[in-house]
Image (spheres, helix red, strand yellow):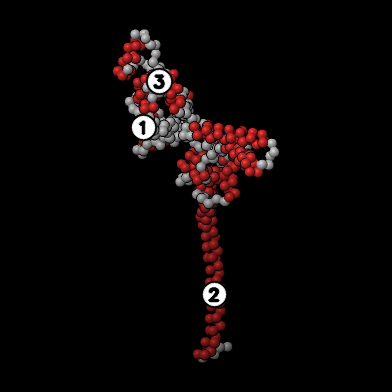
Amino acid sequence: MCKYSHEGKIKCLLPLILLFFIVFLALSNSLQAQNTTKAQVTDTSKVQHKDTTKAQLADTSNDTLKHQLPDSLIYKKIIFTTEEFIRGERLFYGLVYLGDQLVNCAACHNTTVSDTLNWNPDALEISIKYLNKSAYDLSKVLLRPIGKTMKLVHKEFKLTAEDIVLIKAYMNKFETIGLKQSKPVITNLLLLIIAFILFLVATTDLIIKKIFKNRRITWAVITVTGVFITWILAVNAIAFGRSKGYAPAQPIKFSHAVHAGQNKTDCNYCHYTAKISKTAGIPPGSICLNCHFLVRNGTRSGTAEIAKVLGAIDQNKPVQWVRIYRLPDFVFFSHEQHVSAGGINCEACHGNVKEMNRLYQVPDLSMGWCIDCHKARKVNLSNEYYKTYYPDFVSSFKAGKIDSVMIASIGGKDCGKCHY
C-alpha cells in the first residue's frame, strides 16, 4: 500500500502516468495510420485520374513528335557520309527500287551536255536553284507539283524524307562539277600524231640511219604521211574560226519552232531592227512581255521557263542570251542592206528556223559562201533602192536589153564592199 506521504503518492501515480502515456501513443499511431490510409486512397484516386490523363497526353504528344521530329531533323541534315552520297546517286539514276516502283530522275533531267533541247530543267539548273534551300522545299516540288506535266510525271512518286534528302545531297554536287561534257573526237588528232611519227622515222632513216634497204618503202611512207599531214593542217586552218552547227545552251529554253512555227510569229516582230539596222538585235524583255503578260504557262515547259523571263523583267535585268552568228571584226555586214534593199528572207541565211527548237548556225559564214550567194542571187530591180542607185541597170532591164542582174555585177565581189 502506498503511504500517504508526499513521496508515497508520487510513487503510486508514476505507473499510472506511464500507462496513460503508452495508451496515448498507441492511440496516436492508430489514428495516424488511419489518416495515412485515407490519404493514400484519396491521393491514389486523384493521382490515377490526373496522372493517367497527363500520361496519355504525354504519350500522344510523343507519338506526334515521333511522327514529325524525324522528318524535320532529316530535312535539316547537312553532313553526309560517302555511303549516303552513293545512295543518293543510285536513287537519282533509278538504280534502286522504292517498294515496287522505280524512280529515275536522270531520265528527264540531263546530267550531260546535250545539243538537243530538253524541256525539263537539267540537274545543274535544279542544283543551283535549290542550293541554298532546304530539302523540304525540294520535297514540296517533288511530291506536290503544280504544273500539268510535273503532275503527270510525279503522280506515283513515293519518296520518303530520307530519300529526298539523299537525292538533294547528291544533286548539290552538280553546282561544283557541272554537267558532264561529251568526250571530244580525237580520231584525226591521233592519226596526225601517228602520221607525224612515221614521217619523222622515215625521214631520219632516209638521211641518217638507213635501216631499210628498200628506199621505195621509205619514200612511200614519207609521201603518204606528208600528204596526210598537209591535208589535215590545211583543212583545220581553213575551218579555224568557223562555227557551222554551233548550238549553245541558252539561259532560257526558247523554241523558234513554237514561236515562229506553231504560233506563226513574224521574225520581224521580235527582231524589229533587222530592217533598219546593221544587226537584227536580240529582243528585249518588253517584247516577250507583250504576250507573256497573259501567257504564264507553257504546254511543254510549264511555268519554269516563262518565269525566268518574268523574273528578269521584275529585276530589271536583261536575259543573258548567247550569241550564235558572229562575223570577224574585219567583215562588214548589214541586215538592213540584205533584208530591206535585197529583200532576202531570213531562211536564206539562218535556215528553216520555224522547225528549230534549239537554234544553231546553218552556214559556215565563209567568204566563199557569201560570194557564191552573190553570184547566184538576182537583184530585185523593182526595189526603190536599186532604182535610185543603179538607174542604168533598171533602164536596161525595162528596155529588155538584160533579163536579170546578179549581185556580183553591182559590186558583190568587190573586196571593199565588205572589207574597208
| Vertical comparison of 122 with 69: above or below | above
x, y percent for residue 66: 54, 49
| Vertical comparison of 74 with 143: above or below | below
Cβ atoms at labels 1 and 2 below 8 Å apart: no
Q: Nearer the viewer, mark 1 or mark 3?
A: 3
At label 1, the amino acid type is Pro
Q: Residues within 10 Å of mark 3 (few under 14, many from 20)?
A: some
Q: Residue at x 48, y 34 (%)?
A: 240
Q: Residue at x 67, y 36 (%)?
A: 215
x, y percent for residue 89: 57, 43
The disc label shown at residue 284, or none:
1
**Residue of label 2:** 25
Q: Nearer the viewer, mark 2 or mark 3?
A: 3
- Give the CA separation, mark 1 to mark 3: 36 Å
**Of residues 26 and 112, which is closer to you in this image?**
112
**Of residues 246 and 114, which is closer to you in this image?**
246
**Of residues 137 and 132, which is closer to you in this image?**
132
Q: Nearer the viewer, mark 1 or mark 2?
A: 1
- Displayed quadrant of residue 382: top left
At label 3, the amino acid type is Ala
**Residue of label 3:** 408
Q: Residues within 10 Å of mark 1 (few under 14, many from 20)?
A: some
Cβ atoms at labels 1 and 3 below 8 Å apart: no
Sequence-first tag of 1 and 2:
2
Sequence-first tag of 1 and 3:
1
